[in-house]
Image (cartoon, grey):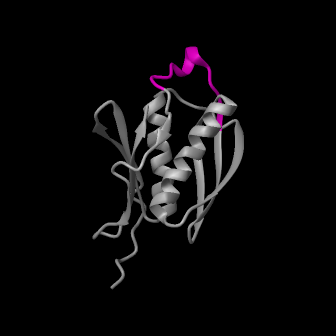
Amino acid sequence: MTAPPVKSRARWEHFPHGADIGIRGFGATPAQAFEQAALALTAAVTHAPIAPSNAIEVTCEAPDLELLLVDWLNKIIYEMAVRRMLFSGFDVRIEGTSLAATLWGEGVDVDRHAPACEAKGATYTALRVAQEDDGVWSAACVVDV
């Protein structure tokens, strides 16, 4: 039996995990949960406003949704590192186990953004992507910081 459609209850949260940080996104669809997980990743780095000045297109593919989440978050971490950017907006499109997304953000301004940490990589620890009994999708893992 399929769960009833869910109105947008998109949100994100952090959960404790030793020296690292757990991130979890929730949404009406896997794509929306992935967007919220990306916002949680950004919030682990800074709480400062990030202007959506530049758009970056990314793609990734994996054998299943859980591995796709890790690849997705690691793609964002890679883009943050090589472009020296932070992102505040995410438009994720998932078809099967392929993801295409647009990331919006701006260059890091150390004084204004005051980064709290550097995300090093998404891990398989606490990795879970699933539709809950109430129909809401969740996407979670631990990020090495």
Compared across the picture, whether 95 is left or right of 124 comes to: right
Instruction: Give the quadrant of residue 54.
Output: top right
| Residue 116 is a magenta residue | yes
Q: Is residue 50 above or below residue 5?
A: above
Residue drawn at point x = 42 percent, y = 40 percent? 143
- x and y percent of residue 9 in the render? 38, 58
Residue at screen point 49% across, 51% down: 70
The picture quadrant where one finds residue 134 is bottom left
- 18 part of magenta stretch: no
Q: Position of residue 27 (x, y in %)?
A: 42, 59
Magenta residues, start to end:
105-117
Q: Which residue lies furthest to the bottom in this view?
A: 1
Q: Reply above or below: 48 against 129.
A: above
Q: Where is residue 127 in the image (x, y as percent from the top left)?
A: 38, 54
Residue 42 vertical placement versus 125 (above, below): above
Where does residue 118 sit, x and y in percent of width and height? 50, 27
User: Closest to the observer: 8 or 133?
Assistant: 133
Compared with residue 143, is residue 57 higher up or lower down, i.e. above or below?
A: below
Q: Quadrant of the N terminus?
A: bottom left
Residue at 50% x, 34% y: name it. 120
**Quarter that holds the C terminus:** top left
